[in-house]
Amino acid sequence: MNLKFHEKLRILVVGLLFVSVLEKKSVAQENVEVFGYFESTLMGSRINDDFYQLMTNKLRVDLSSNLTEQVSFAGNFNYITYHGKIEWNILDFLSDDITSTIPVGLQSIYTIPFNDRTFLDNAYFKLALEKIDITVGKQQISLGTGYVWNPTDIFNVKDPLDPTYEQPGHNAARVDFPLSSAYTISALYSTEKNWQKSGKLVRLKGRVSHFDIALIAIESEWTFHDYTKIDTATMNFFEQPEIRRLFGVSTAGELLGLGTWLEYAYNKMEKSKDFYELVVGTDYTFDFETYILIEYYRNMLGKTDYKEYDLNDWMRFYVSEQKALARDQIYTLIQHPVGDLITLGSSFIYSISDNSLAIVPTLNYSFSENMDIMVYLNTNTGKEGTVYARKSGDGGIIRGRIFF
């Protein structure tokens, strides 16, 4: 292989760290738990009558230790390699009326590269004191009750085709203070270069009757980019940062035998127009083991007419600067176990605003206690220019994961 020096060094460091961890496990196994998984994923997509592939290999190693009754530590690092088509141009997925406005010489700027990565995904310590818990470091921050969309979560954006995939860690300091056996107040601070730009969060969470409920307030900086203007000195798109203040509520519980949830967030913006997001969902498992889930999502940043989608809308959606392109969508999931090892299903993502549909058949196979295989295909049916347009590509994923 023709690897650059820094790539060889990175692989060597990761290998030595992994071997060192495994060796130390036998010595300190009473204090430190070592576990993780290896995952290999093959993704394929048809673009303009050509079929392209991207393969990823991911090694995740987790460490966990209860140092004392009050102090614990957890963390993990990931090493990911990419193979095949490692550069994807977003313009290949867009309609001709959008791409025709961009000069040919600038079209390569809209390419997303996939480079090998080695990174610390999570690393934090937790102090469990008598009346307060304190968590400091890079940690999971999961907010809201929605399955696919979470209006109250400013930290993560899920992939509607694969909404349960793990989310990255975020640097923060968090304090959880129980007010009673039923209510807890939490505060979180996510550091940026100054106080104004940093994330500040306060949440009151409790239980009322059969429902968990949370009230949340967040202030942080939110940066959009103008993808129609390029700084020729840096060849980067111009940034449009502003302060965002979010006020939200989420709840989940059981109503008439159905699992139900609701999540709402109102966003007061410093410069742009205020907007709100809403999720309402329900799920149910029948006696014959078929599971069904339905979730409705409204995002007032989205538009109701696909002819109004512009380059900024598409780019912000693809790079996860905003969660939706269309204003109103419905997600449906149906699953049924076939024996003890296989679950078959399909999800349907329908954009009410532009009458486009994504169909995603799925198969989950528990090959053994420590190995899972997941397959999903996706095909889009909408007309050109809609969010789930046929031109945006049919494809699928095969993912195998082995745990250790």
Image (cartoon, helix red, strand yellow):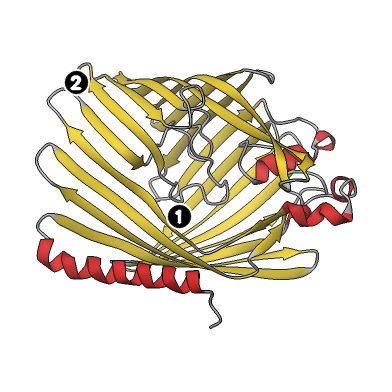
Q: Residue 63: where, in percent of width, then height?
A: 25, 55
Name the residue beneath numbered marker 1: 336
Q: In this view, does 196 lie above or below 257?
A: above
What residue is drawn where x is 70% and y is 31%?
302
Residue 128 as seen in the image, left or right of residue 300 = left
Q: Is residue 236 above or below residue 45?
A: above
Name the residue beneath numbered marker 2: 181
What residue is drawn where x is 70% and y is 35%?
326
Quadrant location, the C terminus:
bottom left
Q: Tell me the element at label 2.
A: loop
Who is closer to the viewer here, 348 or 57? 57
Q: Which amino acid does label 2 sit on?
A: Ser
Where, by quadrant of the figure, is residue 317 drawn? top right
Residue 65 as seen in the image, left or right of residue 261 = left
Alpha-carbon neighbours of circle 2 within 10 Å: few (<14), some, or many (≥20)? few
- Mark number for residue 132? none
Q: Tell me the element at label 1.
A: strand
Q: Residue 274: where, in percent of width, then height?
A: 65, 18
Residue 197 visible to the viewer: yes
**Farthest residue in the front direction?**
233
Mark 1 and mark 2 lie on one chain; the one further toward the N terminus is: 2
Who is closer to the viewer here, 33 or 28? 28
Q: Residue 1: where, in percent of width, then height?
A: 53, 83
Q: Which amino acid does label 1 sit on?
A: His
Does the CB distance between marks 1 and 2 fall below 8 Å?
Answer: no
Q: Is residue 77 above or below residue 257?
A: below
Residue 315 as seen in the image, left or right of residue 86 = right
Residue 390 visible to the viewer: no
